[in-house]
Structure formats: structure tokens, C-alpha cells
């Protein structure tokens, strides 16, 4: 199977939370071409499947910013705070002033703040959280961390303020729909019409007619039960795993 097809199928498996299948396909991608991008794909599959130690082994010695960020997440999940800090800061791991550049922008600064917080480095944590919010004031977890530390909060975003460029612009609706697997991109118009045409039988409670009978007679459901079982359905959100882009 061509590398492009393997890559696309691994991404589709990730989107559908089929992690074992995604891992198998991503391993084939790495076997064909061992690059920073293919390693990131495989490590993402391992990490999403909960195998942080395997993802860590794939990413050791990573140079690309996204790979270093995911490596730091693996280290942190495994309790290796010093290694996580080194993955983000590299040679600047003793960044006492908390001014070094960090991969992945605001997300990387927030992660570094959490590492410092867990390492009892309060002042550095406050600085990283504040820098994080300067880049992305919508990263609410950083506000919560500053509140827990009793640190002053930066000015909140006001209506009319320009939005920060936190990451790549979101895809258009047509692009997002085309990226989904076929079942997810199918409109629900036909389903809604079919559901409306299908009568919903009211629920019934069954009680024995007498102590000697094994048959049951029905009694009308109470108003509360009828309301609770009135045929309303709860829709499950389509949760997508962030895609690992293949370099062009």
C-alpha cells in the first residue's frame, strides 16, 4: 500500500478512536520512511492509546517543535518533570528568568508552567502562565492556575478585541466535512424524515394481574415517565482527534 494511503488510513483510524489499527498502520508508515513527521504520527497513535512510554521511545532525540512538545507531554505523564522541561527548553533548560522560546506557542508555555508548578517553582510558573495568556487569552486553564497560585491576573479579553492567532485557522465547513469518514459526513435529513414517520409507542409498566398468574396486564405510564421516554434522543458529539499533517 502506498505511503499516502497508509497515512490517510491511519488518520481516519485516529479520528474514529481505533487506536490499535492506527498504530499498526503508522508503524508501516515509519517502516517505509523514518522521518520526524512519520514519528510524530506513530507517537500520536501511541499517546492517544495510553502507551506514553512507547510514544516516548519513538520521540527521543526529536528536533521538530511538535515532536518536542509531544515528548514533553509523554515525560510529564510518566512523572519525568526534568526530562519534560528539557524537551521543551533544550539547552535553555535552566531558564531562570522564564524568557526562553518554547515550542507550540501558548500551549507549550502552559505545559511548561504546569511542569514548574509541579516542581515547586512558583515564580517561573507564574511567568510562563502569564506569557501563555499574552499569546492566547482564551486558554482558561492558565487563568485557573494563576488563581490557585494567588498571582495577579492579566487583563481579560473584552468584546470587540481582536482574536489572537492561537494556531492555524480552522478549516471551512466544506473542508471539514470532506475530511470526515463517509458515515460522519452523511447528512441526517433522511434519518430525521424517517424518524418523524415512525410512530413512537408510549411506554407501559407491567404488573402481575394476580399472584397466581404469570401473565402481566398493562397500566398507563405516569405523566413523568411518559415525558422522560417521549422519544427524545440524545445526540453524541463527533469527537475528532487532532490530525498530524504530513509535510508536502
Image (cartoon, helix red, strand yellow):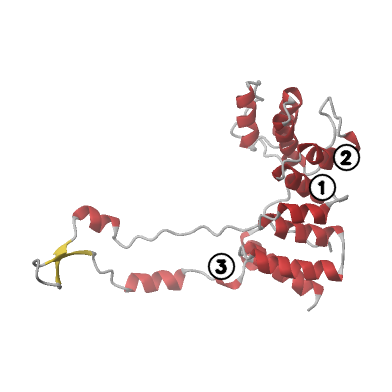
Mark number for residue 24? Answer: none
Give how far across and how far down residue 179 sits, in percent: 66, 66
Looking at the image, is mark 3 or mark 2 earlier in the sequence? 2
Give how far across and how far down residue 20 sits, in percent: 66, 66
The residue drawn where x is 19% and y is 60% is: 221
Q: Which residue is mark 2?
A: 90
Looking at the image, is mark 3 or mark 1 earlier in the sequence? 1
Q: Does residue 157 appear in the picture of this structure?
A: no
Query: In whole angstroms, how far apart are the C-alphas of marks 3 and 1?
Result: 32 Å
Q: Nearer the viewer, residue 121 or 235?
A: 121
149 left or right, relative to 210: right
Looking at the image, is mark 2 or mark 1 earlier in the sequence? 1
Q: Nearer the viewer, mark 3 or mark 2?
A: 2
Q: Quadrant of the C terminus?
A: bottom right
Secondary structure beneath dot 3 equals helix
The residue drawn where x is 24% and y is 56% is: 225
The residue drawn where x is 67% and y is 69% is: 21
Q: Nearer the viewer, residue 218 or 136?
A: 218
Mark number for residue 68? Answer: 1
How many numbered marks does the figure carry? 3
As displayed, is residue 158 above or below residue 169? above
Q: Which residue is mark 3?
A: 184
Amino acid at each position: 500500500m502506498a505511503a499516502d494511503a497508509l497515512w490517510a488510513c491511519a488518520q481516519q483510524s485516529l479520528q474514529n478512536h481505533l487506536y490499535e489499527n492506527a498504530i499498526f498502520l503508522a508503524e508501516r508508515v515509519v517502516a517505509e520512511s523514518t522521518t520526524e513527521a512519520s514519528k510524530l504520527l506513530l507517537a500520536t497513535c501511541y499517546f492517544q492509546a495510553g502507551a506514553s512510554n512507547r510514544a516516548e521511545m519513538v520521540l527521543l532525540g526529536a528536533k521538530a517543535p511538535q515532536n518536542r512538545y509531544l515528548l514533553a507531554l509523554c515525560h510529564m505523564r510518566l512523572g519525568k518533570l526534568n526530562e519534560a522541561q528539557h524537551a521543551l527548553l533544550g539547552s535553555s533548560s535552566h531558564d531562570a528568568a522564564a524568557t526562553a522560546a518554547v515550542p507550540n506557542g501558548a500551549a507549550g508555555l502552559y505545559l511548561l508552567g504546569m511542569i514548574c508548578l509541579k516542581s515547586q517553582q512558583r515564580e517561573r510558573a507564574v511567568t510562563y502562565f502569564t506569557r501563555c495568556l499574552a499569546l492566547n487569552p482564551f486558554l482558561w486553564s492558565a487563568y485557573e492556575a494563576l488563581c490557585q497560585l494567588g498571582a495577579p491576573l492579566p487583563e481579560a479579553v473584552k468584546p470587540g478585541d481582536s482574536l489572537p492567532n492561537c494556531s492555524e485557522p480552522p478549516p471551512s465547513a466544506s473542508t471539514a466535512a470532506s475530511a470526515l469518514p463517509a458515515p460522519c459526513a452523511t447528512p441526517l435529513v433522511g434519518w430525521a424524515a424517517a424518524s418523524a414517520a415512525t410512530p413512537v409507542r408510549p411506554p407501559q409498566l407491567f404488573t402481575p394481574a394476580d399472584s397466581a398468574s404469570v401473565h402481566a396486564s398493562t397500566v398507563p405510564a405516569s405523566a413523568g415517565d411518559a415525558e422522560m421516554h417521549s422519544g427524545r434522543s440524545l445526540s453524541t458529539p463527533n469527537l475528532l482527534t487532532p490530525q498530524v499533517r504530513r509535510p508536502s
